Amino acid sequence: MEFPTIAVIEDESIIAAAVAARLRREGFRVEVAPDGPTGVELCERTRPDLVVLDVMLPGFDGLEVCRRIQRERPVPVLMLTARDSETDMLVGLGIGADDYMTKPFSPRELVARVRALLRRVRKFPSPPDTTFRVGNLEVDPARRQVRREEEVIHLTPIEFELLYTLAARPGVVFTREQLLSEVWGYREGFGGRTVDSHVGALRRKLGPDLLRTVHGVGYAVEAGGY
């Protein structure tokens, strides 16, 4: 049986060692890098199944690491940040991170999120070939592309899956818990802010009116476009 490989890119040696030890106890193969350049080289060499990536790193930061490794190939990224910085989170999500956790974090929750992100990569169904329109956008599930007129709008893999989940059932209101389950594979009630942050990232790329917030409930794509 092939065990998934996790790259842990973290400069705080105590945290890196603790995360690596916990993941190894859970059956994962783990490789560790202490800075940005070494982390990129590690990902190029080992081609991990998932990356646990600190934002603040020597050499260059985790955001630059995320950019470089996502250029190489799409890979799930769980970012760690010592600061509750909305800017770091949104930039990280916009360049391909799937989720984030703020230090200090629960090792049990980190393992649960790692497992869920790996399941999502394996299980997300192949969408139908038929393109459809939502607002002034054309959604092409087969190519996993979104276009406005002739312009292709770059979405990260998880942004596309979130948009597709909402747009395939226009007018239906999804709770955060439903979206966390369907898009991220989370089933333990954590990650609500992740949904909000990804919706915010989609609004900046697609316009503010496509995704409707239903206060106290969740989100929907407007049935009649905009």
Image: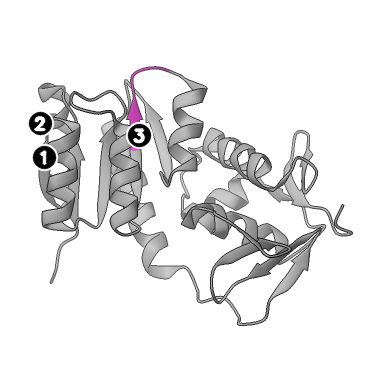
The answer to which quarter of the image holds residue 168 is: bottom right
Residue type pointed to by label 1: Val
The answer to which quarter of the image holds residue 142 is: bottom right
Q: Is residue 118 above or below residue 42?
A: below
Nearer the N terminus, badge 3 or badge 2?
A: 2
In the drawing, what numbered circle is on residue 32?
1
Residue denoted by label 2 = 17
Residue 183 on image: x %, y %: 53, 56
Give me the residue at 51% from left, 41% from top: 189
Nearest-to-viewer mark from 2 and 1: 1
In the image shown, does 164 or 184 lie closer to the viewer? 164
In the image shown, does 67 or 127 lie closer to the viewer? 67
Give me the residue at 16% from left, 25% from top: 11
Residue at the farthest front position: 150
Nearest-to-viewer mark from 3 and 2: 3
The span shown in magenta is 79-83
Residue 29 on image: x %, y %: 11, 53
Query: Badge 2: few (under 14), some or many (20 or more) residues near its Cα, within 10 Å?
Result: some
Q: Tags 2 and 1 in contact by the CB under 8 Å rule?
A: yes
Nearer the N terminus, badge 2 or badge 1?
A: 2
Whole-angstrom CA distance, mark 1 to mark 3, is 17 Å
Residue denoted by label 3 = 63
Is residue 82 rendered magenta in the image? yes
